[in-house]
Amino acid sequence: MIERYSRKEVRDIWEDKNRYKIWLEIELAAAQAMEKFNIIPKGVAKKVKSKSKIDVNKISKIEGKVRHDVIAFLSSIMEKSGKEGRFLHKGMTSSDVLDTCFNLQLKQSGNILLKDINILLKSIKKQAIKHKYTLTIGRSHGIHAEPITFGLKLLTFYAEFSRNYKRLEKAIEEISTCAISGAVGTFANIDPRIEKYVAKKLRLKIEPISTQVIPRDRHAHFFSILGIIASSIERFAIEIRNLQRTEVAEVYEFFNKKQMGSSAMPHKKNPVLSENLTGLARLVRSTVIPAMENVALWHERDISHSSVERNIGPDSTVTLDFALNRMNEIVKSMKVDSRNMKKNLDLTKGLFFSQRVLLHLTVQGFKREVAYRMVQKCALKSIENNKSFYNSLLEDKKIRDIISVNNLKKLFDFSYHTKKINVIFNRVLKKNE
């Protein structure tokens, strides 16, 4: 996680100061619950809260000696809070604080990511509707296939990110658990009612059963969803990169007047933002395998997962937040060249109407394989002689005897390929309203 690819809102969630703030909230909530159930004297939480002060440098200094972050934190708080501080952490274990905090940080980060996706969806929808009937060529294997519209192309991304929104919602719900169950998760030294109170206070759910740590399959699921979202960003970014290629030149990233594309070649306008997103997507996905490997811990607890999560927690959420915001900026400001789209449509001189001719011949009674060969012969002739597919068909006596000129003209109608666009748009947009 470096500042170049991060925004302050999510980055702040993972700063030491916020982490210790959450730890203190957990400890104070547990103390309040213990007071409520007459486990510790009344007023402890209030006094500790009024006297305690989070000193990041002090905690770090103590940790350098004791080699334990939670003990260092508690020692620092107790120094300020006085004798009431001795009631903190009663019956609890470090993982109660660490895991509950980590899940809360993931929830906080996840909620920001949901907002990011929602903003991106609005931008995609706006552009999709704007270009609902902007004709362009559809490609399969990188080769011209049949006409679609640029709006329809964008609508596929709208549907995909709508699914990502729902996936992330469920992942946040699954990760939003709290465990205050003590050593090896038996509640031997702490009342389960404390956990319930803390969970409610922090707007989390209780972890039904913890082994001293919250089960890491929850986290593996969360990070996997982040990886899927990153892959969706990359799919979108690659499409823009391909459409900006000189040979295609249909869509461009916004390029401001003072921007420079190359240190050597002044003419260059490179799709650097989209390329950058491809790299960031790789980074987010790289956190998925370590998260899955964290599921298998020794017995009731070990800390092999800890060092991994201290890295992938901030790195994945901060990077994905940045990537989603960058993707949104690209979508909002991209330049669509409909003239080049039309120019590229005309490159193959009507070859993409081949399926219509094929289907018409089958309706006329020809076996599909025979009709296919007839149409393919004219298509290849069109390519070899660099002439229109329409004229190649007209010159084929066998086809001309079957299809009249008027009927052939009807088969070369672009509106045939856009007649169901409204159906698809209504299906996608109504489903996601």
Image (cartoon, rainbow, N blue to C red):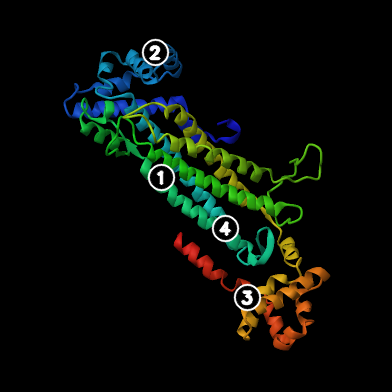
* Residue position marked by numbered label 4 in the rendering: 126
Instruction: Kindly tell me whether residue 3 is visible in this rendering.
Output: yes
Residue 396 lies, with reference to residue 420, above or below; the image says: below
* Residue position marked by numbered label 2 in the rendering: 66
- Check contact, mark 2 vs mark 1: CB within 8 A: no
**Label 3 element class:** helix
Q: Measure how far apart labels 3 and 2 are at the Cα level.
A: 74 Å
Q: Residue furthest right?
A: 385
Residue 370 lies, with reference to residue 249, above or below; the image says: below
Task: Please tell me which residue is depicted at 77% across the width and 40% down the height of the picture.
Answer: 262
Q: Is residue 278 left or right of residue 291?
A: right
Q: Position of residue 387 (x, y in %)?
A: 81, 72
Sequence-wise, the earlier of marks 4 and 3 is 4
Report crowding for label 3: few under 14, some 14 to 19, many 20 or more residues within 10 A (C-alpha): few
Q: Position of residue 428 (x, y in %)?
A: 49, 63
Q: Position of residue 201 (x, y in %)?
A: 29, 35
Report crowding for label 4: few under 14, some 14 to 19, many 20 or more residues within 10 A (C-alpha): some
**Label 4 element class:** helix
Residue 203 lies, with reference to residue 334, above or below; the image says: above
Q: Position of residue 4 (x, y in %)?
A: 61, 33
Task: Please tell me which residue is depicted at 65% across the width and 52% down the height of the picture.
Answer: 240
Q: Measure how far apart labels 2 and 4 are at the Cα level.
A: 56 Å
Between 220 and 35, the residue placed more toward the observer is: 220
